Image (cartoon, coloured by chain):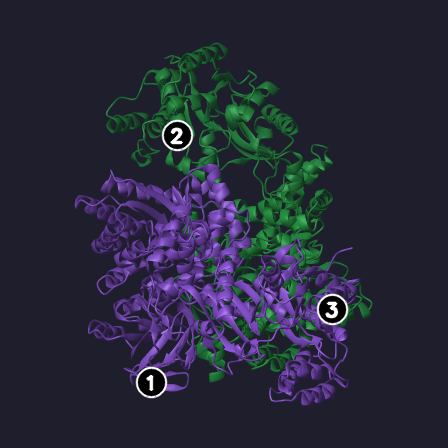
Chain colours: A green, B purple
C-alpha cells in the first residue's frame, strides 16, 4: 500500500514533488538537526489519490491518526485535550507555490473547553481567546467558504462563533480530529479552485500534480518577553550585501509581522534581547545557506527562549542582489561560475541598464499606455521635435509628446529624455527608435489628446500645458503627472564579471540591431560582436534627403530615378562610414531598403500637386505588409539597391583607406520568397561590388521572414552566404497576424482570456514559427552545411527565444543594443541547460 | 562511337527524344511503307555534342556525307549536279515544337549552274529561278542573319543574290555540301536563340535537350496539272466529325497553301482531278490514324501523280472536337476509355460551358482589363444596379458598368449579362460573384471613367452613353464597343459521356463553392458532390439585414449585439434552408463569418454620425488581411457564431421536418491558427447544436489557411473532424503576398520578367504552399488517420493543382460551379498519371 504521510524526520524519496516546497524545507531542516516544530507532511500522492477517488483515500485517515499519536508522544501534549491541548497548523504546500490555493489554518485543536485550558496554561486569557477566534475565522473562511467580510479582526471568539453558526447553520466543530480532517480536505479541494486552475493554465503547470499538506505543532512567539517572531534573509535581498537581514517582534505572532500592526525591529536588536536565540539563529542561517548554497528566506519563532525555524526557501531578490550574491558566493567557494551564471534571471537585467521609478516613491498614475521601451524619465512636456531639440540642447529634461512620431522627429527624439504618443504600438516609429536609443517610450495612450495650437494636452482627464512636468515609465506603460524620484542604472563590476563568465560559456554569438554610428558604439560597449541588422530606411529620411527620395519616386523613368539616387548616395555613404568605423573589425549586416515606397510620400491630403496625388494613390496598398516592399523593390527598380550597394562599397573602401580595419560587410536582401529573386539580386550585388571594390571581401545573404523562404531554404541556400531569421515578419506571416492590428485588439483579448499564453511578438512561438525555423535550418544546411545562420527579430533579445536559437543551432542572435547583455547571459544559460539535459538550473528551480 | 545520323528507313532506339517530332514522323511513316521522300535525320544527340564542343562534332560531317551518297544512289540524282541536281530541304525538329527556332530551308543544292539544269529538266525556267530565289532568301535570312525586310517576294534570283552579296560581303555559296553544312549548323545554333530560350524557360523545357535536323529530298507539287500540294486532317479539327478534312492546290508548292496567295480547294475535289492519288491519300490517312490512334495533321505533295507525305503529327483541335473524337474513337475501338479521358485538356472545357466570341468575327478591342470571369456577353451599358435589374427583368441584355461593385449591387448583377469594372482585381467583389454565377466579368480596366451624373462613360478614349452596346470577353479581358457575334455553350452528350468515364476513374470527390441556392443547384447540375465552401458573409448584406448588422456592430454590449443578431437569424435560416434543399443528401460545408467587421460599415466620409465614425475608426486596420477576422471574430464575440450555428441547426431541422433528406452539415471555422481557438469554437458549436437539434449529425472542422495551422495540424486535428485547405489565404501568407496588392503590380512584373513562371494565385505553388499542405496532411493524419481533407481555394479548379491534391491524398476538391466539370476530368487524369508512374499521357504527349 502506498504510504501517504511522512514525519519531518523520516526520509522520503520523491523530494519536492512528493512533499511540496514547504514540506521538503521542514523535513530537510529537521534532518539537518535544525530546530523545527514537530510535525508531518501528507504527500502530493495523497492529494492525487483524493482527486482520483473523488473524496476518499483508503487508509489516509488512519495514517494521519497514527502520526498525530506520534506527535502527542513527542510533545507530551494531547490533541483535543481540555487542559493543555496540542495545537497544530495545517498548511498547503505544492511543489510550485501557487496563488489561489488555501494557505494556512492555525490553532487547529482548540474548542470551547480547551481554549480555557490554553488560557490557564499560558496564564493569558486574552491570548487564548484570540487564538480561538483566529481558528474559527480561518476555518470558517477556508473550510466552509464563509465570505471574508462577514468576520472582523475585532470580533471576540464568541462573536466569531455566532457568525460561524449563522452562516453554516451548524455549530463550530468541537472535535479536534474532525477539525483536522476537514482542514486537510479543504487544502486538497483548493487545488481545484478556479483561481488555481487559471494560474496553472497560464504557467503551464500540469493539473494532476496535486498539493501536499503540512501538519505542524503550534509554537508561539507571544508567550512573553522571552518569545519573539520574525522573518530573516541570509543576505540583503535588495543589494546582495553579505550578512543576515531581517526583522522581528518581541512577544508577537508571525502574522503580526506581516500585518504591519506593530513596527518590527531590525534583527540586530535581537542580539540584545535574546542573545542566545540570536546566536543560534545566526548559526542556523549559516548552515542553511551552506546547505542550500543559495540565499534563504526564513521564518522563525522564539518560544520562551527556544528557537524554531518554521520555513526556509530560496529568497527572491533584486537583479543587483542576484548578481552580487552570485559573484560573492563564487568567491566564497559556495557555487561554481556555471551556477552563478545560471542563477541570474536575464529579464531582470533591464532593471540595471535603465533608470527606473524609485520603488519607494508614491504617486498617482494619470494614464496607462503600452510599455513600448523600458526605462523611466521625467521632463517638461514639449509638443514638437524642434522645441525638444532646443530645450534638450539647453540642458533641460523634456518629454516629447506627440500623436505619433515620424522620421522627421528624429532630432527631437535624440534630445528628449523620453517619448509619449497617443497612437501607435510596439512597432511604431517612436517605439522602435526609442528602444534603439535605450530611452523610455510609452505609446498608444488612449485618451491622450494634443492641441498643438493651444500648446496643451489632455491626459487622463487633466489639462496640462507645454512646460508642465511628466514622468513616464516605459517598462510598465505608466504616465504620472509631476516628477517621480528615479533609481539610476547600476552597471558595476559584478555585472561585468557575470557577463564575462557567460561569454566563456556561450556558443551563440551576440550581435546588435543598430542603424547608426551612435547605436553601433553603444552596442559595442555592451559587448555586441557585430551588427546583425542595420536597417537602411532611416537613411532615406531627413531634411536634405527626403526631397531627393520623393523626386526618385515621382520620376517617370529609370534615368530620372538614377539621377536622384546619385545625389542620395553621398549621404548614405557617409552614414555607412560612421557605422563601419564604430564596428571596425566586426561583421556588419546591412539590410537594403525594405518599406513600401509610399512611406516616403506625404499623406494624400497633404500632397502638394496632382502628380504627387496620383503617385500616392498608385502606391497605396490594402495590405502594405504583404505588398511591394523588401526585395520586390530591388527587383523592380534595381537602381535603388545598386545605389545602396555602391554606397556600402565606397564607404568600406574609404574607411580602409583611412587606415581602419576593413569592415566585414554582409549585404542582406529582405523579403525573399523565391530563389530566383535572390539569384538576381546577388548578381546585381556582385556586379556593383566588382565595379567599386573588387578586393573587398563580403557576404551576400537574405532574411528568412516569409514561410516560403523557410520551406525552400534548400534552394535559396544555393545563392545565399547567410540567412538571418526575421522573426518579426515571420511571426506575422506564419500566424497571419499583423502586429499593428493585433496588439491592443484581438491579441490582447486572447492573452487576457488565456487563448494564448504568451505574446508571440515578444516570446517566439516555438511550436509554430520555431518549427518552421528548425525546418529552414535543416534544409538550408542540407544544401550548404556551413551557411551562416542568425536571427534579427526582436526575439533575439528574449531569453527563452535565445535558448531556442541555441538549440536549433543558429550561429548568432542579434537584438537591440540594450538587450545585448541579456542575450549574452541567456546564450550562456542555454549551454548550461543543454548540458543538464533539460534539467532547469535557474535560481529556485 | 556514337551514331549521329539515321535514314528514315533505319530503325533507331530513342524515338521522339532522339529524332525530334518531325523526324520520328517521317521515320515511322517510311517504316510503315507510306510514301515519304527519301531522307535522313541528324539526331538531337548530335546537337548536344555540338553545344558541348562549341562547334565541331567529330565524325558528323563524314556521316552526313555518307547518307547524302546513299540518297544519291536511291534517287538516281547527284547532289550539286549541274544537270539534274538532287535538292533537299533542311528542317529543324525538336522533340517539343518550339517557336523561335529556325524552321526550314528549301532547295538546298541549287547554284548558279544547276538552276539552269533544273530549268531544263523540268522545262520550266520560271519555276527553277523561283526555287533558287527561295533558297538564297531563306539561306540569307536564317544562316547569315540578313534582316527579312532586305528581301522581297518579287525579287528575281539574281536580285536576291545581289542583296545577299551586299549584305554578307561575299558570294552566295555555290558548293552544295557547304550549303548543307552551314544550314545544319544554323539549325543547331537556333536552339540557343533568345526567343527559344525564353520559350523553354517559360514552359520548363530543359535547355540541354537540343534539336534534331531533317534532310529531305525535295519533291515538287508544282510540276504541272498532275501535281498538287495540300494539308489534311484525318477528322474535322473544329467539330471532330469523322471523315478527312483538308485543302489543296493543283500545280503549287506547300508554301502557297499557307501563304494564301491562291485560294485552296476542299480536299473532296481532288478526287476528280487526281483520283488515284486521292484514293491513296485516303487509304494512307486511315493507316496513319489507326497507327497513331489519334487524329493526325498531315502535309502532302503529289508530284506528277505520285503521292508523298511530308509530315504527320497529332492534330490540334477545339475542345468540342477533342471530346467528339475521343468518344468516337472509343466507340471505334481505337482507344480505351482511359485514353479518351486522358486526351481532353481540362482547361479547354471552359470554352464549352460559356458563350464566347465567334472566332471568325472581326472587331476592334477598345480596352483591356483583367480576365476576371470567363465567358462573353453583349448588352446595353447600365450604370447602376437598379437600372440593370429593371432592364434585365424587361428582357433586355445589359452590361453593368461600375467603378467597383459592392454587395448592394447584387440584384443588378443577377439580371445583367455581364459586369465591367474600373477598379478591383481577380478577387474583387464583382469578380468573385460573377465567377460564382458563371457570368463574364472584366475588372480593373485602366482608363475606364464613369460619370454617373451625365450617364456617360469614357472607355479607351471614346465617350459612350448609357444604352450604347458593349461586348465583353471575360476569358481574355477584352472590351469591344458594339455587338460581336457569340458562339453558344456546347454541353452535349459526348461531354457528359467523357465526364461519366472520368467519374468512374477518379478517387477525388468534387464539390463546389456556392453561397446560395441558385449556385448550389447549378453546381449539382454540373456534377458537384456537395458544397465544399458556403461563404456566409453575403448573408449579412442586403437591404433588410445590413442595418441590423450595423446595429450589432455599434451595440455597446453583448445584450445589444444579441438583440440585433436575434433579428438577423431568421433571414440566415431561410438562406440555409434554400441551400440545404438544393443539396439534399449531400454534404454542405458552411464557413462561419470571415471578413473583418469594418466591411459592413460605410466608408468613413459617408458615416452618418459621430458614433459610427468612432466605430469605423476603431475597426480600421493597417493590414485587414491579417487583422480581426475569421475565428478571431467568433472568439471575441461568440454571439455572432452562435447565431449562425443556430440558424444552420434550425434550417436543417426545418428541411428535415418538411420531409427532405437530412443535409450533411459541416460547420467550418475560418483562420484558425491555434488548437485552443478551435477547441473553444467546437465547444460553442456543440453546445448550440445540442440546444437546437440534438439528433442532427454534423461535422465540425476548420480551414487550414495559415502556415501555423498547417504546421500544427497534429494538435488542431485533435479537435477537428475535417480540414479544408484555404489555399487563397494560405498562398497570401506563405508567400507574404496580398493578392490585391500583387496582381497588376509587382506580381505582373515578376511574371513578365520571368522571376516567376506561374501566377501562384491561379496555379498552386506546389514547392512552397504545396509543401506545407503535404506536411499538414501528414501531421493531421498522424493524430487522426481518418480526418476528412479537402481544398476550397480557387486552386481546387485548376488542373495541375487538382492533380497535386490527388497526389497528397486529399479526399475532395471544391471549386466554383462552372469549374466542376474541369475538376472532375482533372481528378480522373490524376489517377491515370499516377498509374502511368508520372508518364504524361495527355494528347500529343
Q: Residues within 10 Å of mark 1 (few under 14, many from 20)?
A: some
Q: Give the structural element (helix, strand or loop) at label 3.
A: helix
Which of A289/A358 is in front? A289
Q: CA distance from mark 3 to mark 1?
A: 56 Å
Q: Give the structural element (helix, strand or loop) at label 1.
A: strand
Q: Chain of mark 2?
A: A
Answer with left or right where residue B331 lies relative to residue B30: left
Image coordinates of residue B101 in percent, x first then y, are 63, 71
- Residue ID for mark 3: A689
Q: CA distance from mark 2 to mark 3?
A: 69 Å
- Residue ID for mark 1: B464
Image coordinates of residue B518 in percent, x first then y, are 26, 59
Foreground: disc 3 or disc 1: 1
Answer with left or right where residue B575 lies relative to residue B89: left
Foreground: disc 1 or disc 2: 1
State the residue at coordinates (65%, 31%). Answer: A293
Foreground: disc 2 or disc 3: 3
Answer with left or right where residue A237 lies relative to residue B549: right
Say whether residue A382 is visible.
no
| Relative to A596, residue A199 above or below | above
Quarter of the image where the C terminus of chain B is located: bottom right
State the residue at coordinates (65%, 86%). Answer: B125
- Residue ID for mark 2: A190
Amino acid at each position: 500500500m502506498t504510504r501517504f504521510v511522512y514525519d519531518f524526520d523520516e526520509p522520503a524519496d520523491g523530494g519536492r514533488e512528493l512533499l511540496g516546497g514547504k514540506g521538503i524545507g521542514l523535513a530537510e531542516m529537521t534532518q539537518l538537526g535544525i530546530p523545527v516544530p514537530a510535525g508531518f507532511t501528507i504527500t502530493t500522492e495523497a492529494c492525487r489519490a483524493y482527486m482520483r477517488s473523488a473524496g476518499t483515500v483508503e487508509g489516509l485517515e488512519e495514517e494521519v491518526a497514527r502520526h498525530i499519536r506520534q506527535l502527542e508522544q513527542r510533545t507530551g501534549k494531547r490533541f483535543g485535550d481540555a487542559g493543555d491541548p496540542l495545537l497544530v497548523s495545517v498548511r498547503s504546500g505544492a511543489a510550485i507555490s501557487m496563488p489561489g490555493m488555501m494557505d494556512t489554518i492555525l490553532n487547529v485543536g482548540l474548542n470551547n473547553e480547551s481554549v480555557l485550558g490554553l488560557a490557564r496554561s499560558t496564564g493569558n486569557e486574552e491570548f487564548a481567546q484570540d487564538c480561538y477566534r483566529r481558528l474559527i475565522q480561518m476555518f470558517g473562511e477556508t473550510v466552509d467558504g464563509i465570505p471574508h467580510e462577514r468576520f472582523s479582526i475585532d470580533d471576540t471568539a464568541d462573536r466569531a462563533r455566532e457568525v460561524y453558526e449563522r452562516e453554516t447553520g451548524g455549530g463550530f466543530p468541537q472535535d479536534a480530529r474532525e477539525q483536522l480532517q476537514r482542514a486537510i480536505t479543504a487544502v486538497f479541494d483548493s487545488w481545484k479552485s478556479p483561481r488555481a486552475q487559471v494560474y496553472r493554465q497560464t504557467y503551464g503547470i500540469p493539473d494532476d500534480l496535486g498539493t501536499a499538506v503540512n501538519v505542524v505543532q503550534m509554537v508561539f512567539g507571544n508567550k512573553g518577553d522571552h518569545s519573539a517572531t520574525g522573518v530573516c534573509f541570509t543576505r540583503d535581498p535588495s543589494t546582495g550585501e553579505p550578512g543576515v537581514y531581517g526583522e522581528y517582534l518581541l512577544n508577537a505572532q508571525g502574522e503580526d509581522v506581516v500585518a504591519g500592526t506593530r513596527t518590527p525591529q531590525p534583527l540586530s536588536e535581537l542580539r540584545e534581547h535574546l542573545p542566545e536565540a540570536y546566536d543560534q539563529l545566526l548559526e542556523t542561517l549559516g548552515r542553511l545557506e551552506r546547505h542550500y548554497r543559495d540565499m534563504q528566506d526564513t521564518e522563525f519563532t522564539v518560544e520562551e527562549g527556544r528557537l524554531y525555524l518554521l520555513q526556509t526557501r530560496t529568497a527572491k531578490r533584486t537583479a543587483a542582489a542576484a548578481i552580487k550574491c552570485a559573484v560573492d558566493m563564487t568567491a566564497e567557494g559556495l557555487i561554481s561560475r556555471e551556477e552563478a551564471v545560471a542563477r541570474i534571471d536575464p529579464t531582470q537585467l533591464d532593471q540595471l541598464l535603465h533608470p527606473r521609478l524609485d520603488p519607494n516613491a508614491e504617486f498617482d498614475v494619470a494614464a496607462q499606455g503600452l510599455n513600448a521601451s523600458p526605462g523611466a524619465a521625467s521632463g517638461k512636456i514639449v509638443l514638437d521635435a524642434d522645441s525638444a531639440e532646443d530645450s534638450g540642447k539647453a540642458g533641460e529634461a523634456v518629454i516629447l509628446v506627440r500623436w505619433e512620431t515620424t522620421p522627421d522627429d528624429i532630432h527631437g527624439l535624440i534630445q528628449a529624455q523620453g517619448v509619449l504618443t497617443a497612437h501607435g504600438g510596439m512597432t511604431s516609429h517612436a517605439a522602435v527608435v526609442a528602444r534603439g536609443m535605450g530611452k523610455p517610450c510609452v505609446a498608444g495612450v488612449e485618451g491622450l489628446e494634443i492641441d498643438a495650437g493651444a500648446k496643451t494636452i489632455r491626459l487622463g482627464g487633466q489639462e496640462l500645458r507645454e512646460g508642465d512636468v511628466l514622468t513616464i515609465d516605459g517598462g510598465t506603460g505608466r504616465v504620472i503627472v509631476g516628477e517621480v524620484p528615479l533609481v539610476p542604472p547600476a552597471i558595476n563590476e559584478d555585472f561585468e564579471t557575470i557577463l564575462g563568465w557567460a561569454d566563456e560559456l556561450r556558443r551563440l554569438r551576440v550581435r546588435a540591431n543598430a542603424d547608426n554610428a551612435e547605436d553601433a558604439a553603444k552596442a559595442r560597449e555592451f559587448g555586441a560582436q557585430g551588427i546583425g541588422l542595420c536597417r537602411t530606411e532611416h537613411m532615406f529620411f531627413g531634411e536634405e534627403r527626403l526631397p531627393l527620395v520623393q523626386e526618385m519616386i515621382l520620376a517617370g523613368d529609370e534615368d530620372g530615378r538614377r539621377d536622384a539616387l546619385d545625389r542620395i548616395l553621398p549621404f548614405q555613404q557617409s552614414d555607412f562610414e560612421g557605422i563601419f568605423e564604430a564596428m571596425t573589425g566586426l561583421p556588419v549586416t546591412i539590410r537594403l531598403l525594405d518599406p513600401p515606397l509610399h512611406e516616403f510620400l506625404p499623406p494624400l491630403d497633404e500632397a502638394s500637386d496632382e502628380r504627387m496625388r496620383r503617385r500616392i494613390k498608385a502606391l497605396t496598398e490594402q495590405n502594405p505588409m504583404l505588398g511591394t516592399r523588401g526585395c520586390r523593390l530591388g527587383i523592380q527598380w534595381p537602381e535603388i539597391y545598386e545605389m545602396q550597394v555602391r554606397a556600402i562599397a565606397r564607404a568600406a573602401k574609404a574607411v580602409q583607406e583611412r587606415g581602419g580595419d576593413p569592415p566585414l560587410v554582409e549585404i542582406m536582401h529582405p523579403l525573399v520568397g523565391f530563389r530566383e529573386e535572390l539569384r538576381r539580386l546577388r548578381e546585381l550585388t556582385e556586379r556593383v561590388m566588382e565595379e567599386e571594390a573588387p578586393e573587398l571581401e563580403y557576404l551576400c545573404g537574405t532574411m528568412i521572414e516569409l514561410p516560403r523562404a523557410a520551406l525552400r531554404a534548400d534552394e535559396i541556400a544555393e545563392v545565399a552566404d547567410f540567412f538571418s531569421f526575421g522573426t518579426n515578419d515571420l511571426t506575422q506571416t506564419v500566424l497571419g497576424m499583423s502586429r499593428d492590428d493585433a496588439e491592443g485588439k484581438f491579441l490582447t483579448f486572447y492573452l487576457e482570456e488565456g487563448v494564448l499564453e504568451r505574446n508571440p511578438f515578444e516570446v517566439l512561438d516555438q511550436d509554430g514559427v520555431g518549427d518552421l525555423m528548425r525546418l529552414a535550418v535543416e534544409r538550408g544546411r542540407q544544401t550548404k552545411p556551413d551557411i551562416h545562420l542568425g536571427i534579427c527579430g526582436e526575439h533575439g533579445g528574449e531569453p527563452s527565444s535565445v535558448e531556442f536559437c541555441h538549440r536549433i543551432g543558429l550561429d548568432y542572435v542579434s537584438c537591440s543594443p540594450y538587450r545585448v547583455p541579456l542575450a549574452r547571459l541567456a546564450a550562456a544559460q542555454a549551454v548550461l541547460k543543454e548540458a543538464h539535459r533539460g534539467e532547469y538550473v535557474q535560481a529556485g528551480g
